[in-house]
Amino acid sequence: AADNSVPTRQRRFALVIMSTTTINDKIAKLQAATDASQQDMQQTKAALDDSLERLNAAKNLLQQMDPEDQERIPINDTKLPELLELHAMAQEAHQTAQGRYETNQRYLTLYQTKLEEAAAATASGAGN
């Protein structure tokens, strides 16, 4: 047996409104965090692409050399170790940024769904 007394319905709607405001605040914060993490992800992707281009260019230069010259040059005298390290750091930074963006996006979607459900509950409750 549902309690449809006026005070109970008013309290229920007040709770829905209060929770909707809290959800709206969380959505706004999550949207800002998601936007920032998306921008960070794009920047780290550009750095990753750049590091890969540099690494490939250095490899191509070495491959174009005569085999005799390749054997005479110690690998540490080339830029390869530095470029490999740079690429590994760029890859790690991008993976971290991408993970942060995906997590923020997941929570943003979750809270937006909660807001829609709260709005639907308010609309169906108002019709009673």
Image: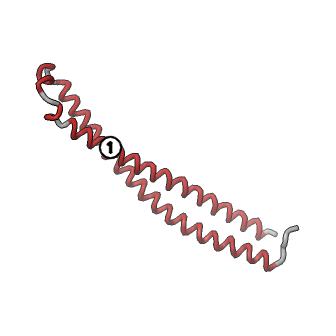
Position of residue 95 relative to residue 127, above or below, is above
As helix, strand or loop, the secondary structure at mark 1 comes to helix
Kindly identify the amino acid type of the residue bearing the numbered disc 1: Leu
**Number of residue marks:** 1
User: Quadrant of the image for the N terminus?
Assistant: bottom right
Residue at (72% x, 65% y) in the render: 121
Asked whether, in this view, residue 8 is left or right of residue 52, the answer is right
Mark 1, other Cα within 10 Å: few <14 / some 14–19 / many ≥20: many
- Residue 86: image location, x then y, percent: 26, 43
Residue at (25% x, 36% y) in the render: 55
- Residue 126: image location, x then y, percent: 76, 70
Which quadrant of the structure image shows residue 73? top left
Along the viewing direction, whichever of 9 and 81 lies nearer the viewer:
81
Position of residue 68 relative to residue 2, above or below, is above
User: Quadrant of the image for the C terminus?
Assistant: bottom right
- Residue 33: image location, x then y, percent: 45, 61
Residue at (81% x, 78% y) in the render: 6
Residue at (16% x, 34% y) in the render: 76
Q: Which residue is mark 1?
A: 48
Which quadrant of the structure image shows residue 113? bottom right
Asked whether, in this view, residue 128 is left or right of residue 33, the answer is right
Along the viewing direction, whichever of 66 and 84 lies nearer the viewer:
84
Colouring rule applied to residues? secondary structure
